[in-house]
Structures are given as structure tokens and as C-alpha cells.
Image (cartoon, grey):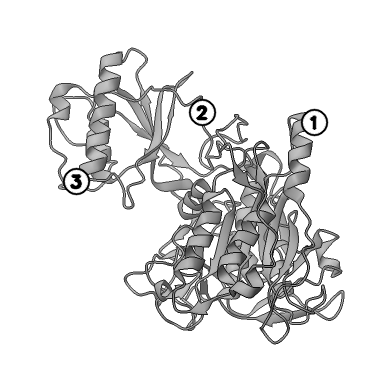
């Protein structure tokens, strides 16, 4: 999300009288203020409901707020967040800033919003809203697009007016590398326009070719010209299975685009590399603690990991990688906005994406295509969306709700972290059988390079942008969220 200024200690304030008031649950609509002795701060920006990020607000401080009030208010928010989290999951404050505007941005419950509006030092509160970034360069409309692409670019259920129309920002995915951990990629397919490359074959006595087609189909949904979400992204093959679904490692060949990015950054202070994503449309029945820890570790090292929830119409929490806490876990939806009958579900599923009768690229020729169904198809829709957003918002201060252009602000970076291919190999080293994993390259460390959007912020953005309540057939414990690319308001 965009950060309006440097991260300085400048939060809003609360008098001792207000801080003593309990937070009650008798009011649920933050647009209807409580009645009391104070004038309530106005709540702005709710006139475009399709553009509003649910439960997300910008709280702005009056310019004459005292330091004592700032400190008092900060202490109050800490107490509230500990005792009564401001939003499910305890997200709370996301950014604190100072400058032309002083205050903070965060996610708050309706009850907490009433409290904040009653504070006399609050100048105003504004809904966070999705950026209409496309307004400055124009929306590109692809006609005759697969239904899945059309669906993720519209809020409402597909109609005769929107069916087959994919609306998107042509910058989406530019400078982003997506590692497709699968059966390989038909890198010579015309639809990839030269943006597909072979990263590594981890299958013993095998060739650098997709003999199954599954990986090529996923890569096409991610980044191909006609069938892809992020039409500017690079896709890199990491082959872990043969045509029969079994595999073992062979060579240590790899293409290290992250290293190229670091060299470019060191020479110019800028880089065209905007981030790395892993798509894993793979899985196993049962939970692998080591596998989940490896995936979560990769996320912790800065790589965006998107995985399929599984196809057994069961609880995704009982599967790996569906139970990986930090990954984006994706279930499958249909053209009629139903949960696909096969899709796993449950609290471990992050979002849903199109996954039924998906047309994409295939093995066997430069123009080959086929239809496939599964959460394996939903995951690349979402990995493509992650790459798409990274291409548009590459800054570490990414915020999809403020302003029309990203602000490039130097961000904090760990002194030591893995480069992108090494993080992928770290995951595979944990997931593959030990004799195979031992042949993988040793992870290499990097100490400098460009800062990109963190996986945690991107996951929050995917959740914040998602269309809510659109799907049917979901169990009560499953989030009703369908991915959305923010290209249209409707």
C-alpha cells in the first residue's frame, strides 16, 4: 500500500475523558456516529462503494494536536488492539506517517471506528479506496478472453455485457519473475512472446521439456498473451515431475534473474526487477510439517508463494501446501460463481479464483491449447494477479488504496536473505525426498539489492481487493472472497 510519508511517530490523540469510555457493540455502522458531547469527525470517501476497501481507513490528526495527546492515543490503541483487536486477525494499524498529513492508516472494526470518530483531536477519517491507476493510462480491454480473466476484472457476476472482456493495466507483471514449480513449460509457445525460460530440471534422467502439459497450462494462465493475467511477466520453469508424475533431480542449471537485478541496482540505483513469485499447483494428501515450514520460510525471506488448495472437496488444512500459513492458498470457483464441486475449502483457504474449464496454453506445439479444471488452475490466476500488482506497485511502500502512482521510498531490508532461486530450492529441498533434495544447489546469500513489496503486504492487498460474498456453496468456515484485479469499479 502507498505510504504517504516516512514512518515517524505521529498518531492521533485521545483525551483522558474519551479514553475512559468503554468500547461498546451497540452500534455497527461507522457512518452513523454516536451522540455525545463531542462533534464527531466526518467519515469521507464512502460515495464509491465498489472502490472502498472493507474495514480500512485513514485517520488524520488535527495539526495542533499535542505530543502528549499523540502519546496518549498511541497507548490507547495498543491497549485496544491487545484486549479487543480492531479487526479479525488483529491487523490494526498498518502505517504511521507524518508530513503534509499526520495520522495513520489501518483496518478497524465498526465499533472502534465510533471510538476514533469521537476523539476531538481527529480532524477527519477517510475510507481507504482502491486506486484507479488505470485512469491515468487507460484500461486495456481484451475481447474474447477466457471467462476466468473476465471474471477477475469485474466485481459483479459475468453478464452478456462483460463475458469475454478482460480489462487490465498493460503494465501488469512487467519486471516480475514467476517460477512455475510443476512439469515444466513449453517455452517456445507463441503465446509467451519470448518471456518464458527454463530455470531448472530436478527430474533425474529427464529433459528440459514439458511432457505433461500441466505446467505449461499454469504458466499460460499466469503470463501468456491471450490467456494470462499478467501479460508482461516472465515465467520460469522449475521441473519437478515427469509426464508420469514422478521425479528426481539431475542438473544444477539455473537462471538467476534476481542476481541480474542486484547488479542493475548496484550500477544505477534502479532496477527493472520488481519481485519474484512461486506458483505451486502441486500437493499431497496429509500435512507435511517440514514442507509447510519451508514454504512459510520462503515467504519470510521475501518471495510470494501461491499454492493450490487441493481437489478433494475436503478441508485444505489437512493438506500440504494447502495448510501453509503464510502462502496464499487458492480454492476454485466456477463460471456461475459457485465453489467448484471438487475444491477444497475451510479456514486455510485464503481466496478463490476461477478454476473450472479454463482454457490455456499446452504442450506439443507452438499454438497448442487445452481446457483444464482444478485448483491447479485457480492458483495461477492468483499468482498472475500477484505478479500483475507487483508490476504496477513495485515499491516497498505499496498501498493499493491511496493516490494514483506508487511512491518509491527506500525500505528496510534484511542484511541477509536468499535470492529468489535459492529460496525456491530451499522449499524443494524440504518437500522432495532426501536423496533428491541433497542434489539441489546450496542457497546463496545476498546482502543488498532492490526492495520490493513484502509478501505480507501483498497478501493483505489480495484480501483487501477481493470481491466479498460473490460465491455460493461455501461452508461457513470458508472465506467468501474472489480475487479482483482493480481494473474496474464494477
Tell me where residue 246 sits by quadrant: bottom right
Residue 51: percent from the left, percent from the top?
49, 47
Mark nearer the viewer, 3 or 2: 2
- From the image, tell me which residue sits under label 2: 4
Asked whether the residues under the numbered discs 3 and 1 touch, taking CB atoms below 8 Å apart as contact, a structural biologist would say no
> Does residue 175 show up?
no
Which type of secondary structure does the marked residue at label 3 adopt? loop
Q: Is residue 480 above or below residue 100?
A: below
Mark nearer the viewer, 3 or 1: 1
Q: Is residue 490 left or right of residue 169?
A: left
Q: Is residue 198 left or right of residue 27?
A: right
- From the image, tell me which residue sits under label 1: 267
Q: CA distance from mark 3 to mark 2?
A: 31 Å
Which badge, 3 or 1, comes first in the chain's sequence?
A: 3
Which type of secondary structure does the marked residue at label 1 adopt? helix
Who's the residue at 26% across and 46% down the image? 85
Foreground: 115 or 447? 447
Which badge, 1 or 2, comes first in the chain's sequence?
A: 2
Residue 94: percent from the left, percent from the top?
42, 38
Who's the residue at 13% across and 37% down the image? 22
Which badge, 3 or 2, comes first in the chain's sequence?
A: 2
> Does residue 95 show up?
yes
Foreground: 266 or 74? 266
On residue 318, the disc is: none
- From the image, tell me which residue sits under label 3: 27
Q: Is residue 325 left or right of residue 190?
A: left
Q: CA distance from mark 1 to mark 2?
A: 28 Å
Q: CA distance from mark 3 to mark 1?
A: 56 Å
Amino acid at each position: 500500500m502507498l505510504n504517504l510519508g516516512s514512518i515517524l511517530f505521529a498518531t492521533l490523540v485521545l483525551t483522558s475523558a474519551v479514553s475512559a469510555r468503554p468500547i461498546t457493540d451497540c452500534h455497527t455502522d461507522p457512518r452513523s456516529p454516536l451522540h455525545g458531547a463531542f462533534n464527531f469527525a466526518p467519515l469521507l470517501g464512502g460515495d464509491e462503494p465498489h472502490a472502498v476497501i472493507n474495514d480500512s481507513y485513514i485517520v488524520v490528526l488535527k495539526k495542533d494536536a499535542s505530543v502528549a495527546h499523540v502519546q496518549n492515543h498511541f497507548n490507547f490503541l495498543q491497549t485496544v488492539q491487545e484486549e479487543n483487536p480492531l479487526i479479525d486477525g488483529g491487523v490494526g494499524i498498518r502505517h504511521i506517517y507524518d508530513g503534509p498529513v499526520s495520522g495513520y492508516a489501518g483496518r478497524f472494526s465498526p465499533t472502534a471506528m465510533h471510538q476514533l470518530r469521537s476523539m476531538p483531536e481527529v480532524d477527519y477519517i477517510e475510507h481507504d479506496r482502491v486506486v484507479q491507476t488505470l485512469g491515468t493510462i487507460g484500461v486495456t480491454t481484451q475481447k474474447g478472453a477466457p471467462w476466468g480473466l473476465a471474471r477477475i476484472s469485474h466485481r459483479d457476476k459475468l453478464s452478456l455485457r462483460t463475458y469475454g472482456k478482460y480489462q487490465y493495466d498493460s503494465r501488469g507483471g512487467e519486471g516480475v519473475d514467476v517460477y512455475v514449480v510443476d512439469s515444466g513449460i513449453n517455452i517456445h509457445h507463441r503465446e509467451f512472446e519470448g518471456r518464458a525460460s527454463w530455470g531448472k530440471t530436478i527430474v533425474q534422467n529427464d529433459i528440459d521439456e514439458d511432457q505433461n502439459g500441466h505446467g505449461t497450462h499454469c504458466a499460460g494462465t499466469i503470463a501468456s498473451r491471450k490467456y494470462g493475467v499478467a501479460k508482461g511477466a516472465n515465467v520460469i520453469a522449475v521441473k519437478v515431475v515427469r509426464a508420469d508424475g514422478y521425479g528426481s533431480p539431475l542438473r544444477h542449471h539455473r537462471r538467476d534473474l534476481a542476481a541480474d537485478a542486484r547488479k542493475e541496482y548496484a550500477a544505477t540505483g534502479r532496477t527493472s526487477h520488481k519481485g519474484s513469485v512461486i506458483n505451486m499447483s502441486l500437493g499431497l494428501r496429509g500435512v507435511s510439517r517440514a514442507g509447510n515450514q519451508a514454504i512459510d520460510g520462503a515467504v519470510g525471506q521475501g518471495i510470494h508463494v501461491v499454492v493450490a488448495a487441493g481437489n478433494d472437496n475436503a478441508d485444505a488444512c489437512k493438506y500440504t501446501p494447502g495448510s501453509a500459513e503464510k502462502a496464499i492458498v487458492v480454492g476454485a470457483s466456477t463460471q456461475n460463481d459457485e465453489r467448484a464441486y471438487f475444491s477444497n475449502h475451510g479456514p486455510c483457504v485464503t481466496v478463490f479464483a476461477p478454476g473450472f474449464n479454463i482454457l490455456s496454453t499446452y504442450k506439443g506445439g507452438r499454438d497448442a491449447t487445452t481446457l483444464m479444471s482444478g485448483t491447479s488452475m485457480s492458483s495461477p490466476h492468483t499468482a498472475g494477479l500477484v505478479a500483475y500488482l507487483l508490476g504496477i506497485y513495485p515499491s516497498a511502500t505499496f498501498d493499493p488504496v491511496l493516490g494514483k502512482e506508487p511512491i518509491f521510498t527506500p525500505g528496510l531490508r534484511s542484511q541477509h536473505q536468499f535470492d529468489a532461486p535459492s529460496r525456491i530450492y530451499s522449499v524443494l529441498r524440504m518437500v522432495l525426498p532426501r536423496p533428491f533434495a541433497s542434489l539441489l544447489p546450496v542457497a546463496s546469500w545476498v546482502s543488498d539489492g532492490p526492495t520490493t513489496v513484502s509478501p505480507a503486504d501483498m497478501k493483505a492487498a489480495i484480501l483487501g481487493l477481493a470481491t466479498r460474498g460473490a460465491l455460493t456453496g461455501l461452508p461457513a468456515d470458508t472465506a467468501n472472497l474472489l480475487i479482483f484485479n482493480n481494473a474496474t469499479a464494477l
